Every structure is written in C-alpha cells, then in structure tokens.
Image (cartoon, rainbow, N blue to C red):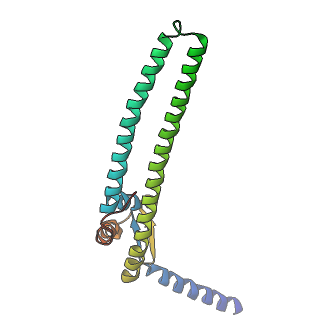
Amino acid sequence: MKYLVKFFVVTFLLLICTHVLAEQKITYLDIKFVLNNSKAGKGAQDFLQKSFKENQKKFLEEEKALKKRENELLSQKTILTKEQYGKKSDELRKTVMDYQSRRRASIDKITKQRAEAKQMLLKKLDPILQTYINENGISLVVKKKNVLVGRTELDITAIIVEKLNKELPSLNIK
C-alpha cells in the first residue's frame, strides 16, 4: 500500500511537470543575421570596411615607397662608404619599424571599433528582446545556430530586426 501511494504521487507530479513544460513557448533567433542586417549593423560594417580599405590603400602606397627606397639604397651600396650606407640603412630600418607600428595600430583601432559597435548593438538589442519576450509570453529564446530543425513560425529574427531598426537607425562610430 505504501509503495502504491508513492507510485501515484510520483506519477501525478510527473504528469503535472510534463503539462507545465508542454505549455512553454520556445523561439529561436539568428543573432548574426540581426547584427549584420539591421540598419545600424549595416551602417557600422560599411563604415568599418571603408575605413579599412582606405587604410590598406594608404599603407600599400607607403610600402611601395619604402621598397623603392630599399632598392635605391641597395643599388648605391658600392658607391657609398660603409658609414654612409650604415647610416642610411639604419634610417630606413627605423622608417620601416615606424610604418609597421602605425599599420598595426590602425588595424587594432578598426578591430576595437568593430568590437565596440557589436557591444553597442547587443546592448540595444537586449531590452528589445526582453520587451518582446514579456509581451508574447516566451519562455526561452535559443540561438538559431543551435537549432537543428524548427518551424519557421518560431523564428523571431525578422521581427527583432524590424524593432531594432525602429529603435536604433544608426550607430555613432568614432
């Protein structure tokens, strides 16, 4: 009798838990799509790509000039004295090191700007998601990359992109 009561209690609790879990609403979101295709995300990406290409072009021209200086110095090696050649060689080496450090700093700056832009977007996205979740009674939002198969009605990506576009039309990247 004692075991029969325990069995019924456990079965009853299991049925209640299953019923409660069955009513949970779960959706999924493609966060990468939201970041890349929202107005603010596209604007930030365009700005960063333009900045990167401009820097690449500038540094490529400077690199060509440095190579030209190096070739001129090598062609003058037999004409110049050892001291003059050493002095010019040291100057060129310092110029190359300065060029490399400026190039590295430029790439680091763009990388930092990209990370800051992503953080700003995620900060603005969080309250939008929280509001949407509360309004629609959603229990769980899963990243789309972690979903193997799901109904398209459960994908809230387009809705969130639309809300983000209204809330944040652009980012101010400096």
As drawn, is 161 to the left or to the right of 118?
Answer: left
In the rendered view, tell whether residue 56 sits above or below residue 148. Answer: above
Q: Which residue corresponds to the image point at 45% horizontal and 22% vertical from the top-left?
A: 67
In the rendered view, tell whether residue 121 sits above or below residue 95. Answer: below
Horizontal and vertical percent for residue 100?
51, 35
User: 53 or 61, which lies in front?
Assistant: 61
Q: Which residue corresponds to the image point at 47% horizontal and 56% vertical from the top-left?
A: 115
- How many numbered discs? 0
**Quarter that holds the C terminus:** bottom left
In the rendered view, tell whether residue 14 sits above or below residue 106. Answer: below
In the rendered view, tell whether residue 49 sits above or below residue 158. Answer: above
Residue lying farthest right? 2
User: 93 or 110, which lies in front?
Assistant: 93
As drawn, is 104 to the left or to the right of 83?
Answer: left
Q: Which residue corresponds to the image point at 41% horizontal and 35% vertical from the top-left?
A: 59
**Quarter that holds the N terminus:** bottom right
As drawn, is 102 to the left or to the right of 56?
Answer: right
Horizontal and vertical percent for residue 5?
65, 92
Horizontal and vertical percent for residue 76?
49, 10
